[in-house]
Image (spheres, rainbow, N blue to C red):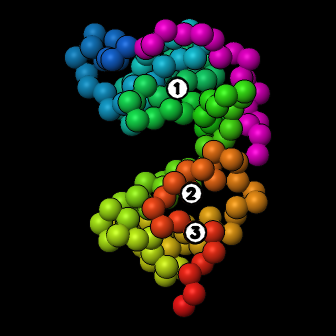
């Protein structure tokens, strides 16, 4: 599935980004996560932060795309097209939030119980439908991007076929 964001040409070569939100530092406020404008390089706090400086910057400047500056995150977001995507060699591909969340829960399941759930109705302790997630992606192999297939196949115990009951 190709990225449908119409603002990819506005992505510029920006510096590494800051490890603080300068506007929050100025006001003595706190931030939750940091984001960086991919047009001008400005660092701001995320929409979960009290001041939402990154989205305010996007709205005021018209700069549409930002990226996460969190160490374990590599995604970009277009405010105008409301699309999350990831840079890969040769282009971009959309991020599937259900797949991404499920990968985290699947790793947790393997770490805590030693295997992926086989029951379609299984849920994580916080209610995430991990059984439904496993069933959904077992049947989606032909429609997934190569990077998504690789991520699933890297899960310990992953199989494309449902186990026999």
Of mark 3 and mark 1, the one earlier in the sequence is 1
Q: Using the image, determine if residue 9 lies above or below residue 159.
A: above
Tell me which residue sits at (65%, 17%) in the image. Answer: 11
What label does residue 153 carry, if any?
2
Please tell me which residue lies in front, 156 or 144.
Answer: 156
Q: SS of the residue at dot 3?
A: loop
CB atoms at circles 2 and 1 under 8 Å apart?
Answer: no
Of mark 2 and mark 1, the one earlier in the sequence is 1
Taking the view exactly as shown, the residue that stands out farthest to the left is 28
Q: Which residue is mark 3?
A: 159
Q: Is residue 125 magenta?
A: no
Q: Is residue 4 magenta?
A: yes
Magenta stretch? Answer: 1-17
Please tell me which residue lies in front, 27 or 129.
Answer: 129
Q: Is residue 19 visible?
A: yes
Q: Position of residue 82 (x, y in %)?
A: 64, 37
CB atoms at circles 3 and 1 under 8 Å apart?
Answer: no
What label does residue 67 carry, if any?
1
Majority secondary structure of magenta residues: loop
Q: SS of the residue at dot 1?
A: strand
Tell me which residue sits at (63%, 69%) in the image. Answer: 160
């Amino acid at each position: 599935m190709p990225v449908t964001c119409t603002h990819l040409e506005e992505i510029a070569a920006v510096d590494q980004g800051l490890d603080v939100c300068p506007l929050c530092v100025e006001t003595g406020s706190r931030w939750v996560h940091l984001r960086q404008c991919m047009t001008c390089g400005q660092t701001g706090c995320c929409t979960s932060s009290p001041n939402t400086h990154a989205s305010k910057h996007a709205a005021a400047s018209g700069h549409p795309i930002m990226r996460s500056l969190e160490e374990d995150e590599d995604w970009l977001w277009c405010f105008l097209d409301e699309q999350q995507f990831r840079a890969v060699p040769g282009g971009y591909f959309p991020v599937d939030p259900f797949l991404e969340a499920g990968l985290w829960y699947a790793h947790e399941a393997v770490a805590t119980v030693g295997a992926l759930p086989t029951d379609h109705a299984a849920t994580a302790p916080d209610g995430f439908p991990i059984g439904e997630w496993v069933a959904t992606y077992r049947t989606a192999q032909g429609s997934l991007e190569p990077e998504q297939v690789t991520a699933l196949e890297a899960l310990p115990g992953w199989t494309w076929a449902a186990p026999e009951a």
